[in-house]
Amino acid sequence: MATDLVYAICRMSDIPSQRAQGFQLMRVGDDGKERAWPIIVVRWGRQVFGYENKCPHDGVNLDWERNQFLDPNGMRLMCGKHGALFELGTGMCVDGPCKGHWLNPVPLAVLDEDICVVGVQLAEDAEEDGPDACEEAG
Ligand code: FES
């Protein structure tokens, strides 16, 4: 993994604490091809957690309703279609059809109040779309 790759996707202040937001990124694979790469960013105070927006049991996006990622208590990520529940800080499924499986983690870092994806090659236009994606969902 190339750790010198850093892409800012939004400002820390764009996501309220204890909320999750989706981003539609484009990733460049080892074969040089670009693929849609939807991710979820969870913010909890000063901490951020990133996961691919893809349920381990059926491969669908968790937000059956757009950008609705949390369970009614706001304590877990939830698949809106089948109700699987995932720990916010680990991505482990604690209930539902994929119990014991994990969301794929996305490496994030906070640099100068920007939430950044690190070590992943993104398509250039995704970088420019990032801030827009933040505003659009706010
Ligand atoms: S797709 Fe896995 S619980 Fe919904």
Image (cartoon, helix red, strand yellow):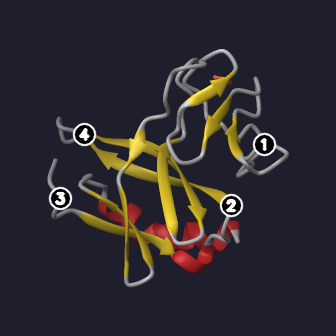
- Which residue position holds label 4? 29
Say whether disc 4 or disc 3 marks the residue closer to the N-terminus.
Answer: 3
Residue at image point 30% right, 55% down: 122
Residue 95 percent location from the top left of the image: 69, 23
Residue at image point 76% right, 34% down: 80
Residue 37 percent location from the top left of the image: 44, 44
Q: CA distance from mark 1 to mark 2?
A: 11 Å
- Which residue position holds label 2? 19
Residue 124 percent location from the top left of the image: 30, 63
Taking the image as four quarters, which one is ligand 1 found in?
top right
| 2 vs 4, front mark | 2
Say whether disc 2 or disc 3 marks the residue closer to the N-terminus.
Answer: 3
Front residue of 118/93: it is 93
Q: Amino acid at mark 2?
A: Arg
In the rendered view, does 116 fall on the left or right side of 51?
Answer: left
Residue at image point 53% right, 48% down: 89
Examine the rendered structure and indicate whether residue 50 appears above or below residue 59. below
Picture quadrant where residue 13 is located: bottom right
Q: CA distance from mark 1 to mark 3?
A: 33 Å
Q: Amino acid at mark 1?
A: Asp
For residue 71, the mark is 1
Q: CA distance from mark 2 to mark 3?
A: 27 Å
Residue 41 percent location from the top left of the image: 54, 56
